[in-house]
Image (cartoon, grey):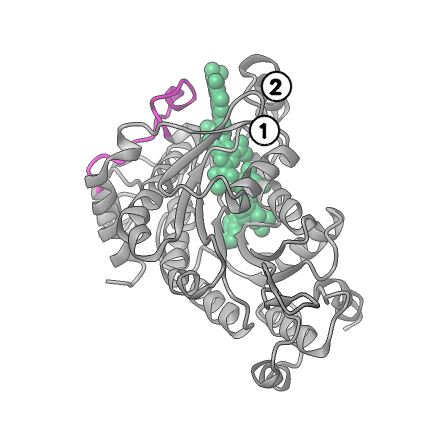
Amino acid sequence: MALQAALLPSTLSVPKKGNLAAVVKDTAAFLSVPQKKLQVPSLSVRAQAVATAPVATPGASTATKDGKKTLRQGVVVITGASSGLGLAAAKALAETGKWHVVMACRDFLKTAKAAKGAGMAEGSYTIMHLDLASLDSVRQFVDNFRRAGMPLDSLVCNAAIYRPTARTPTFTADGYEMSVGVNHLGHFLLARLLLDDLQKSDYPSRRLIILGSITGNTNTLAGNIPPKAGLGDLRGLAGGLRGQNGSAMIDGSESFDGAKAYKDSKICNMLTMQELHRRYHEETGITFASLYPGCIATTGLFREHIPLFRLLFPPFQKFITKGFVSEAESGKRLAQVVSDPSLTKSGVYWSWNKDSASFENQLSQEASDPEKARKLWEISEKLVGLA
Ligand code: NDP
Ligand code: PMR
């Protein structure tokens, strides 16, 4: 209880000019932390959260003195905002004052510490629990988000894991190989469920962004470093990526390769963005985008790599390939894709040149294959229980 008392004020991210409604709403969000981690009496607060009318909650409309409406604060959900790119983008967006950031993370306390450590102002963010390795958790997150009463103006599917040294697969709660399960399937379900919420938003530019990468694109030098990404005919995915009773790899390979599984998941991310664009952009006006933010060689993504790699990778990228980008700079790039008024084009895979100017990049043949995207969509729908 002492730990809980010490943590409550900062983790609740109470708005500075806060009123009770806002506090209670954030409290409801806070309660989405698994109860066994932090025991907080929940039922009465949940009831209040539903009953209390929002006054100055994130995303509420604002009016000037002369009664004219100004653009309200946007609400952006960022998965995996507890470190690296997600944290840097959360900070960049929150600092503008134009965005309230919902940090959708699997480790509540780590995220609370990270937000505080990054200097994010209390009230500029809300932390909600999301474990992409469990489809139940994804559904629970969506429920909790809706219950918190905020609009959804932008969704960033950013979280990922990379298991380059793994010789055997691990599996999600639903039994799918972990890299594809977290990076693709968890986000696929999240994006599909939250499309409704994005559609309901009255924000002028609503966006759904899924992180891609250069290493999933074989039309680049980086994409040709073995093991190369490749989904084949998707037979492993269709078989459920279950390892023991089939293949844990999307292309159906018998042997597991953690580095390839990650790169394959990035192809899935880029194909999914384009399929969303084809199916929903015209009808909804939502902007769908992907990006390669640069090589952010210092992030936690490489935590499972051997120590020598972690030591040499940043200078290698800085001085040899010159593809290195700092976490802060990458955060600004992602923040641009979320909110820059000039980046509203849908179906685009953004990259940046040496002067940090954004441009529409070309995807590899496989990462832009519409037939593969359709097939991936249909199989993924089945695996996450939507079809
Ligand atoms: P980090 O490891 O720093 O961040 C990954 C985030 O994902 C963490 O917050 C992590 O949470 C979260 N995460 C992992 N598993 C789960 C899960 N099961 N449920 C919810 N969240 C989870 O890596 P980066 O910042 O580098 O990566 C961010 C994105 O950028 C990824 O999509 C990656 O593919 C992409 N990218 C990165 C590049 C790079 O050079 N680093 C290059 C190109 C693209 P926790 O803190 O709890 O572990
Ligand atoms: Mg790569 C232009 C050259 C370039 C770029 C931009 C990257 C980005 N890499 C490049 C080149 C090379 N890399 C070369 C020549 C080599 C052989 C020495 C090389 C090796 C390498 C390894 C072993 N690179 C790697 C790894 C990883 O484990 C990283 C990876 O594949 O993670 C999936 C990686 C990366 N190189 C990049 C980027 C952005 C990554 C990691 C991030 C990602 O795709 O998410």
Residue 358 in the image: x percent, y percent?
Answer: 50, 30
Residue 102: quadrant of the picture: bottom right
Residue 83: quadrant of the picture: top right
User: Distance from label 1 to label 2 (Cα)?
Assistant: 9 Å
Q: Is residue 64 above or below residue 87?
A: below
54 in the magenta segment: no
Q: Nearer the viewer, residue 233 or 328?
A: 328
Work out whether residue 105 can be spotted.
no
* Count of picture labels: 2
Q: Would you say the magenta stretch is mainly helix, strand or loop?
A: loop
Q: Which residues are magenta?
A: 217-234
Q: Name the residue tied to disc 2.
A: 318
The kind of residue on which mark 1 rests is Ala
Q: Is residue 364 above or below residue 102?
A: above
Q: Name the residue tied to disc 1.
A: 297
Work out whether residue 230 can be spotted.
yes
